[in-house]
Structures are given as structure tokens and as C-alpha cells.
Amino acid sequence: MIRRVAVQDLVGAHEIAERLGVARPQVVHDWRRRHADFPQPIAQLKTALIWDWSEVEAWARKTGRLQRD
């Protein structure tokens, strides 16, 4: 299945950590291991995983890691 994701919505662990205000990108990988409902990456590069920000944002709102505007 082909899916379209806006370029600005492609994020790695560093961008997720930055957008959610956590100090280290490693926290994102910890969430991935500890929370079965953390979104799956949409791509895997040689040295990085890539997520769709809209999925991560929805997860973060649902779990209280990102406050509603």
C-alpha cells in the first residue's frame, strides 16, 4: 500500500524528542520498546528510523506527553 506523508511530517527520534520536549532522543526508543501502542516507523534507513509525525503526535496526546492546544 502506498501512503503519502508530507515532508514536514517525516521525523526521526531527534525531531520527536525535540517536539515533545524531552532531553534525549534515546527516550523515544525507550517508549518504542516499552509501549506496544507507540507508532511503528514508516521507514528504516541504515542508521535511523523514520516516523509519521501525525501518528506520533496522536500517540503523545493520547498518553499525555503532548498537551492539547
Image (cartoon, grey):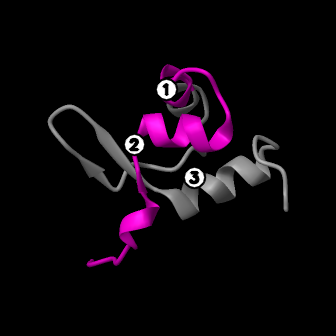
2 and 28: which one is in front?
28
Residue at the spot 64% in from the left edge and 55% down from the top edge? 57
In this rendered view, identify the residue nearer to me: 2 or 65.
Answer: 65
**Amino acid type, callout 3:** Val
Q: Which residue is mark 3?
A: 56
Residue 19: percent from the left, percent from the top?
A: 61, 44
Is any atom of residue 23 visible in this view? yes
Labelled pair 2, 1 in contact (Cβ < 8 Å): yes
Q: Counting residues from the N terminus, which is met first, the one under dot 3 or under dot 1?
A: 1
Q: Can you say whether 20 is above or below 43 in the image?
A: above
- Magenta segment: 1-30
29 on left or right of 67: left
Residue 25's label in the rendered image is 1
Q: CA distance from mark 2 to mark 3?
A: 11 Å
The amino acid type of the residue labelled 1 equals Pro
First along the sequence among labels 2 and 3: 2
Residue 10 counted in the magenta span = yes
Quadrant of image for the C terminus: bottom right
How packed mark 1 is, by other alpha carbons closer than 10 Å (few <14, some 14-19, many 20 or more), is: some
From the image, which quarter does the N terminus lie in? bottom left
Is 62 above or below relative to 6? above
Q: Is residue 44 left or right of residue 42?
A: left
Q: Secondary structure at mark 3?
A: helix
Residue, disc 2: 12
